[in-house]
Image (cartoon, grey):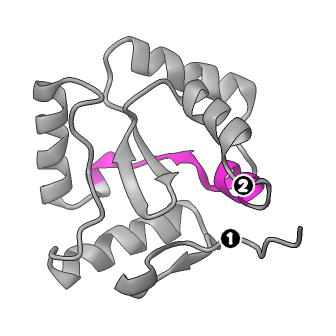
Amino acid sequence: MEPLTAEQIEAIDKRFDAGECVWMWAIHHSVRVEPLAERLSARIKYIRDEKPYHERETRLRWLQPVQEVGGLPPWLLWSLERVERAGRGVFGVPARYDEPRAESRRIAWRHESECPGVPWARCPSQEGMIFPPDLD
């Protein structure tokens, strides 16, 4: 999977600016899916400027929009309604270890089908994106 192009980022920023709740994969390394809380271009700038060098390419490659929001579990879509009511930047979807296993598998399946090959640890003690080693 390739990082998003400048045109794709601009299109997502326009959707966000228009008030659309845009769901993304891997905005943060320990949360598979969540809505944007800021413009995508701002998040990408933060990754490029602030994240460890050895993590940047991985983070940018796997930061992708959700293609089929309807394929997400009902509790997550309910969260979408809360996001829209609360306003962006106020409410995020945290990592959920209390969710039913079937729902967790459903998110994992959707993620793997939309972003095949994503390096994701699946045990709760280390859930999240797997980065290449820091060789510096």
Say if the magenta span includes residue 69. yes
Q: State whether the magenta stretch is mostly helix, strand or loop.
A: helix
- How many C-alpha atoms fall within 10 Å of the one at disc 2: few (<14), some, or many (≥20)? few
Q: Quadrant of the C terminus?
A: bottom right
Q: Is residue 44 magenta?
A: no
Disc 1 target residue: 131
Residue that mark 2 sits on: 52
- Image height of 107 relative to 9, above or below: below
In-image side of 34 versus 82 (left or right): right
Q: Amino acid at mark 1?
A: Phe
Q: Secondary structure at mark 2?
A: loop
Q: Is there a contact, CB below 8 Å, between mark 2 and mark 1?
A: yes
Which quadrant of the rendered structure holds the N terminus?
Answer: bottom right
Question: How far apart in space, not on screen, are marks 2 and 1 (Cα)?
Answer: 10 Å
- Residue at the image position 72 percent from the left and 36 percent from the top: 49
Indicate the position of residue 62 as horizontal and vertical percent values: 62, 55
Q: Total number of numbered labels?
A: 2
